Amino acid sequence: MNGLKDKKYLSVSRKRFEPITVFFSVALLAAVLISAVGVDTGLGIGLGSDNSIIFNDFRSFFFVVGGTIGVLLFQFDIETFFHTMLLVVRSFISSPVKHLNPIITELDETIIKGSSIMELRDGSEINGELLNDIIHMRKEKLFYEEIEDFVTNRIASVFLLRKVAASLLNKGSKIAPALGLLGTVIGLIEVLQSLEDPTQIGPAMSLALMTTAFGSILGSLVFTPLAGRLEHHNNIYLETHKLLMNRVSALIRREERQLDSMAMNKKVDISG
């Protein structure tokens, strides 16, 4: 039983998750960004006399992006930050419950056929697969309540990490626009201080306007959709595990009733 603590139930499927939807959403966001920064695409949407990207103010970009990352690292930690980025990448290439759907189908067929859950896996040792480990615990004579508590705690610990990741992205969606507004205030102050030197007004106005633009883009087009995507995956993850445990509960409790019935019949036969 000590091996249970060293195994993870979750594995990431390598199969693409909704590739058409992912491609469409990324392409749409890219089109929005291209139209926002004013790249000349040959369709007459280019901005500026030199047909180049207008958002080329590194000072403003670093102020918003670097500042947002710095605040997030201060509120959370670097491990949480990189774990969040990893979950974001995984959310585009796999479903959080792709590996559970075949197991649920397998359990449904077992319930319909009236078979035993013990027939589904060998369960002789812990191998990290959820159903196998449940069967192993069952063979170790654990009651369903004990199995449920262990699995629920394991699921809750993983869900907590996913929830923190979504919280980090939601924080970023608020921090980036706030830093953009701060940059605007700083830029306007520089404009007022540069009225006697017109050559300094341009860079100051660039800071005032570009920080607002970068903050809005980062908050509205990056952090907010990514946070929503992770929250959606978190709900799928939690609800799918609930469905799986409901089926496990039905099978185990049916077997317990059958054992109780057999024990009762034996008592009747002996007394008779």
Image (cartoon, rainbow, N blue to C red):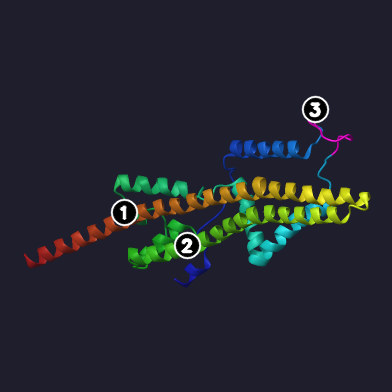
168 and 219: which is toward the camera: 219
Marks 3, 1: nearer the viewer: 3
Instruction: Report the disc number at residue 156.
Output: 2
Q: How far apart are marks 2 and 3 (CA)?
A: 52 Å
Mark 3, Cα crowd under 10 Å, few <14 / some 14-19 / many 20+, is few
The kind of residue on which mark 2 rests is Ala
Q: What element carries label 3?
A: loop
Judge from the rendering whether residue 243 lies leftward or rightward of residue 67; answer left or right: left
Q: In which quadrant is the C terminus drawn?
A: bottom left
**Earlier sequence position, callout 3 versus callout 1:** 3
**Earlier sequence position, callout 2 versus callout 1:** 2
Question: Which segment did they paint magenta?
Answer: 41-52
Asked if residue 55 shows in the view, the reply is: yes
4 and 215: which is toward the camera: 215
Instruction: Report the disc number at residue 268.
Output: none
Identify the residue at horizontal 72%, vertical 63% (top origin).
70
From the image, tell me which residue sits under label 1.
Answer: 250
Q: Distance between the residues labelled 3 and 1?
A: 63 Å
Identify the residue at horizontal 93%, vertical 52% (top origin).
197
Q: What element carries label 2?
A: helix
Instruction: Report the disc number at residue 44.
Output: 3
Kindly check if marks 3 and 1 are in contact, taking CB atoms under 8 A apart as contact: no
Magenta-colored stretch includes residue 48: yes
Judge from the rendering whether residue 202 lies leftward or rightward of residue 261; answer left or right: right
106 and 219: which is toward the camera: 219
| 108 in relation to 245, above or below | above
Q: Tell me residue 106's x, y (percent).
A: 40, 47
Asked if residue 126 shows in the view, the reply is: no
